[in-house]
Amino acid sequence: MNRNDILTQHFAHAFDGKPDLIVRAPGRVNLIGEHTDYNDGFVLPMAIDYDIRIAARARPDRTVRLYSADLDKHDTFSLDDVRRVGEKPTWSDYVRGVADVLQHEGFTLRGMDAAISGNVPRAAGLSSSAAMELAAITAFRRLSALELDPVRAALLGQRAENEFVGMRCGIMDQFISSLGKADHALLIDCRSLSYELVPMPAGARVVVTDSAIRRGLVDSAYNERRAQCEEGARLMGVKALRDVSVEMFGAHQAGLPDVTARRCKHVVTEDQRTLDSVEALKRGDLAAFGKLMNASHASMRDGFEITTPDIDTLVEIQQNMPGCFGARMTGGGFGGCTVALVQGEAVPALVEAIQAQYPVRTGKTPQVYVCRATDGAGLA
């Protein structure tokens, strides 16, 4: 029985009858371009074949009834009175937030019954929250016949998370969940929101590994790094670090405080690495792409200082395996996941090495996900 059939059964159990449709929106992994987004720079994520799915049926009234099959929890709210469930975000707040933002934008929504399930790992930095938002937007869009293009859908998903859920995030997660395409990564210019699909070469696979380290320091460290980047941009007389070339940074580096200089060096060089990575993919040069991934990790470790010893160990295990072009930490830092680009036939040995060596060296049990680039939000 496939996932849609199982979700249809959950829907029938929760609401009686059958759904009108099933929609999906994928999680994502960022291949390269870390902490560049809030500096107006470039990122290169891809949508992964792990997603949130919603089986939904339109209602004749203004009520939204939700059932989380994964948590076995229900929630109900009226479209005439959309508010947060509690002080801390809960699973249904992402759907409530989407409904609130869509209505504030002038869209007329129909009520719905919706059963929700997903296989995007939660709290691992693979953006299950953006997948939930884009799946909810897609369900409302289909049931209420809304004219809503993928870019605007992504921006409204981000607004729901920023303003309703209360989590400050950039646009990357919602953008790739909405605009992803099978067998492609997506270069996003975080200043202009222009984007370009970049083909992923055949024969290589993306391996994402959850380090089992939960990112307890990420909020305070994120805010500190962001302030340091803004200070560096101010001292160099630019709007954002996006405006600083590698050569320009070299001319200013000596005049910056040491910590500020190291933070800025990471962002400036990471932007260039991201653009260079796109050119490498277009050439099909996986070795060059892998070297850029490795350099990205070293920069996050030594300059931006957001890795941990266990994360460094996990990356090292992968970088030393035959057939691994490159590996790096991905996400905000201090835990979460790594991402590696691996020759297809080398994947089993790499996975085996991670599962054998990482627990012995760190005492932690990893979860490994072999991913393909997939389409953005739509019908399941």
Image: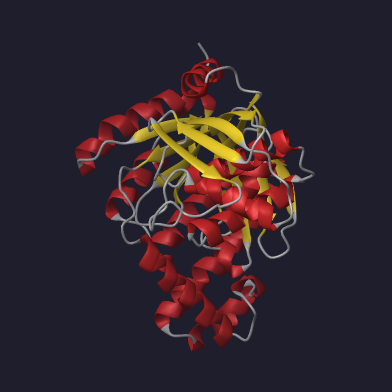
Is 47 placed above or below 154 here?
A: above
Horizontal side of 249 relative to 356 (left or right) equals right
Q: Is residue 53 visible?
A: no
Q: Residue at x 57, y 31 (%)?
A: 113
Is 198 placed above or below 16 here?
A: below
Q: Residue at x 48, y 48 (%)?
A: 93
Q: Which of these two is toward me, 312 or 88?
A: 88
Q: Is residue 43 visible?
A: yes
Q: Which of these two is toward me, 191 or 32?
A: 191
* Residue 58 point in image, percent of width and height: 66, 30
Q: Which of these two is toward me, 227 or 315?
A: 227
Q: Residue at x 47, y 24 (%)?
A: 14
Q: Residue at x 22, y 43 (%)?
A: 362
User: Toward which corner of the image does residue 138 lie, by quadrant?
Assistant: top right
Horizontal side of 312 relative to 63 (left or right) equals left
* Residue 182 point in image, percent of width and height: 67, 32
Horizontal side of 148 relative to 215 (left or right) equals right
Q: How is the image coloured?
A: secondary structure
Residue at far top of view: 1
* Residue 46 point in image, percent of width and height: 60, 42
From the image, which quarter does the C terminus lie in? Answer: top right
Horizontal side of 143 relative to 11 (left or right) equals right
